[in-house]
Image (cartoon, rainbow, N blue to C red):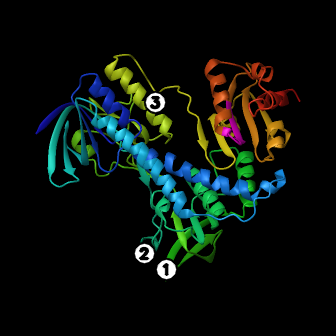
Amino acid sequence: MKHYDAIVIGAGQAGTPLCRKLAESGLKTALIEKRWVGGTCVNDGCSPTKAMVASAKAAWSARHSDALGVSVGGITIDFDDIRQRKDKIVTMMRGNSEKRIQDTENLDLIYGTARFSGKKEITVTLNEGGTETLTADKFFINTGLQPAIPDIAGIRDIPYLTSTTIMELPEVPEHLLILGSGYIALEFGQMFARFGSKVTLIEPSERILKKEDEDIAKEIARILAQEDIEILTHTEAVQFARKGEIITATLESKGTKSQRSCTHVLVAAGREPQTHSLGLEAAGISADEQGHIQVNARLETSAEGIYALGDVKGGPAFTHVSYDDYRIIVQQVIEKKPASIEGRLVPYCIFTDPQLGRVGITEQEAREKGLDFKVAVLKNDSVARSIETGDERGMMKAVVDAKTGKILGAAVLAEEGGEIITIVQLAMIGGITSDQLRNGVFAHPTYAESLNNLFMTLDA
């Protein structure tokens, strides 16, 4: 049995920098990873998907260049080249992270699956064979989420795809049926539609993106419809069957059943925490009904000296949240400073095209809270930069406190929406009011300049 000062379980966006920082502070540290360094973001999520999204955007831009007076001619998709470029990016990022870990003194990288076998003890089933029992004074769990597979008749009998396996397809699907219409579903749906797939999205509720304001979701649905992406709301898949290369889905909508044939099925109906094999009970770690590890504002679990970071603890499942959790742990454990996740402002971006950048609360959340607020809305066909670049799709929206003028939240559905929303976020962090942004001097012509015009609409 080997003892460490600290053990990190999972090499995601919190675990990877954390293990190095712990070791550099003088703590004998071990990092346990069952698959690859880098976690979902590097290997299956952010980096590879955005690399493929860039290829899809290039194809779309080429097809729509005539409006700018540029005739490209025939467009062909080399899916092998797209995948190879994606793989090269992933391999480079993963390799760099792994090398930094291996070059760090006081740090052991162990590939295997960890399970708690005592209060502060884990048994690791090593990838190379055998087991090893380790103990530590402190544990940090960063095991993340995995795709959740719904209990639908016949789904286990078809070669369904997840957000991980779909990126390893050797060819572009002829007809891709997607279960769900959230962020992952929309990004993959638009991507493969641009590669040449017929795409159908299945959504049980009345509309897509229920956490977003209805006008924002409606505009995204309109943009996707322009690309011939079929969205079936009030619809559920209740059964699957396969005959040869064709998959038949039985759909139910408002009590009526119908059948739809496709070649591929992507399950994008949610994600679940990777905790079921961790043996949390043996360590006295509490989890909710879904398996998310419960933590306090300092990321401490119910077991003393054991912390949870990133997606595994529930809440917003974003890489930047995981990384900020790492920052908070460093402040607490190494620097001995008070740090908490309370009140942090978490932005996010959906990498559809145009992007949806979001921060703060929505209009519907403001109404639910009974706040006194005003709403600023600006369509992109009134934005000079959008007109000049020939892409007037989308809109901008902000929720503002009626008395103070402080910005409560905003959504930017536009080219580089993620970058523009960061400006709004900085304003919110600094307490800058909507009046100050309305009267600020921004370079012309930029997308950022449209914030002047957005907040001018409050005076209308």
Vertical placement of residue 24 versus 126, above or below:
above
Give the residue displayed 73% in from the left and 18% down from the top. 404
Q: Earlier in the sequence, mark 2 or mark 3?
A: 2
Give the CA distance from mark 2 to mark 3.
40 Å
Q: Position of residue 318 (x, y in %)?
A: 50, 40
Q: Type of residue at label 2? A: Asp
Q: Position of residue 49 (x, y in %)?
A: 53, 51
Q: Position of residue 31 (x, y in %)?
A: 27, 38
Residue numbers of the magenta segment? 409-417
Residues at marks 1 and 2 touching, judged by CB atoms closer than 8 Å: yes
* Circle 2 residues within 10 Å: few <14, some 14–19, many ≥20: few
Q: Type of residue at label 1? A: Arg
- The image quarter containing residue 373 is top right
Q: Which label is found at residue 157?
A: 2
Q: Which residue is mark 3?
A: 324
Q: Nearer the viewer, residue 288 or 230?
A: 230
Give the residue displayed 61% in from the left and 76% down from the top. 260
Q: Which residue is mark 1?
A: 242
Secondary element at image label 3 = helix
Give the CA distance from mark 3 to mark 1.
44 Å
